Image (cartoon, rainbow, N blue to C red):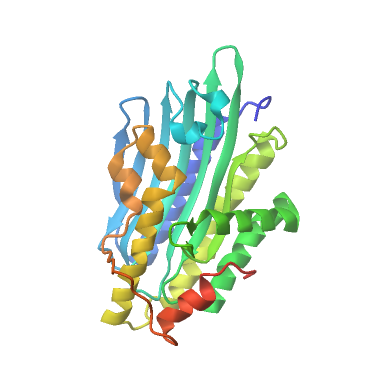
Amino acid sequence: MTGDTPDLARIKQYLTGLQARIVERLEAFDGQPFHADGWERPGGGGGLTRVIEDGGFFERGGVNFSHVMGDGMPASATAHRPELAGRRFEAMGVSLVLHPRNPYCPTAHMNVRCFVALAEGKTPVWWFGGGLDLTPYYPFEEDVRHFHATCKAAVLPYGGEAEYRRLKEWCDRYFHLKHRNEARGVGGLFFDDLGADGKTGFDAAFGLTRSVGDAFLEAYLPLLERRRDTPYGERERDFQAYRRGRYVEFNLVFDRGTLFGLQSGGRTESILMSLPPIVKWRYDWHPEPGSPEAELYERYLKPQDWA
């Protein structure tokens, strides 16, 4: 958006606090600490990666804060804004992905971010983006409904039912593997360019972004608490690894955050922390009709009104 000037110090204070709060809760749930890995970007800025591998519960998880700046806008940021090409930029955000070991516990993703394009003698252009989404392997309807109801409650104060519907449907479109004509998971919320059109002021845009970030733990942790002790075997682990392959395909081919991070010279280890540690691909595999694996495809990987 032009006109309003974003309060970057206030945004950074919120994002670093959000990272700390989420990691504290996840460490208490897992029983093992997240490793803290600070980094600096040669072109300007840096961040703090908090990561866990082979934890008591999480097979891999990462909660990353980054604040980077540079002299030229990355291609992923100017693809639909060519008028901003060549401007300096400043971007910051929190991004997390959590891969539980138990296949009955879903993978989850959340991201909230702010971007500012700067040029001498011109008003800064800024926008917010983000969202959260759920990727189950063996879904439970009550879990999916809880996740979506929490997402809906986060958006309602910032535009009502219509805005929730817009962000929910945007998520369904975004987390879709076009080359497979298949949803990555059961969706949630997604938004980008909030404020870029000049219709949303800074306070409203930042308010929605905070509401989405603050909703994550309430949306996700209750699902893990219900399912963490569900027994599983090699069959479930094998299917989990197969479906994780879809996660890898999406993140490396379509994900805007991954593309921006790599194009802007971000830290590769932090950018690719979202990838699961154990993944499998099979040639032309299809689940057995009537199986729990088939139910994921037939019932859950189809956008619907879960809330």
Q: Is residue 152 above or below residue 6?
A: below
- Residue ID at (49%, 34%): 77
Placement of the C terminus among the 4 image quadrants = bottom right
Q: How many marks?
A: 0
Q: Please state the horizontal and vertical placement of residue 137, each as a whole percent of the image.
A: 41, 73
Q: Is residue 30 above or below residue 259?
A: below
Residue 234 appears in the rendering: yes
- Residue ID at (65%, 69%): 305
Residue 139 appears in the rendering: no
Q: Write down the quadrant of residue 80 in the picture.
A: top right
- Residue ID at (31%, 52%): 51
Q: Is residue 245 above or below residue 213?
A: below
- Residue ID at (36%, 49%): 252
Q: Write down the quadrant of residue 122 in the picture.
A: top right
Q: Please state the horizontal and vertical placement of residue 148, each as a whole percent of the image.
A: 59, 66
Residue sitting at the far bottom: 290
Choose between 103 and 175: the one closer to the eye. Answer: 175
**138 displayed left or right of 152:** left
Q: Write down the quadrant of residue 197 in the picture.
A: top right
Q: Please state the horizontal and vertical placement of residue 25, each as a whole percent of the image.
A: 43, 59
Q: Please state the horizontal and vertical placement of residue 235, each as a whole percent of the image.
A: 29, 81
Residue sitting at the far top: 121
Choose between 21 and 228: the one closer to the eye. Answer: 228
**150 displayed left or right of 54:** right
Q: Is residue 153 above or below residue 143?
A: above
Placement of the N terminus among the 4 image quadrants = top right
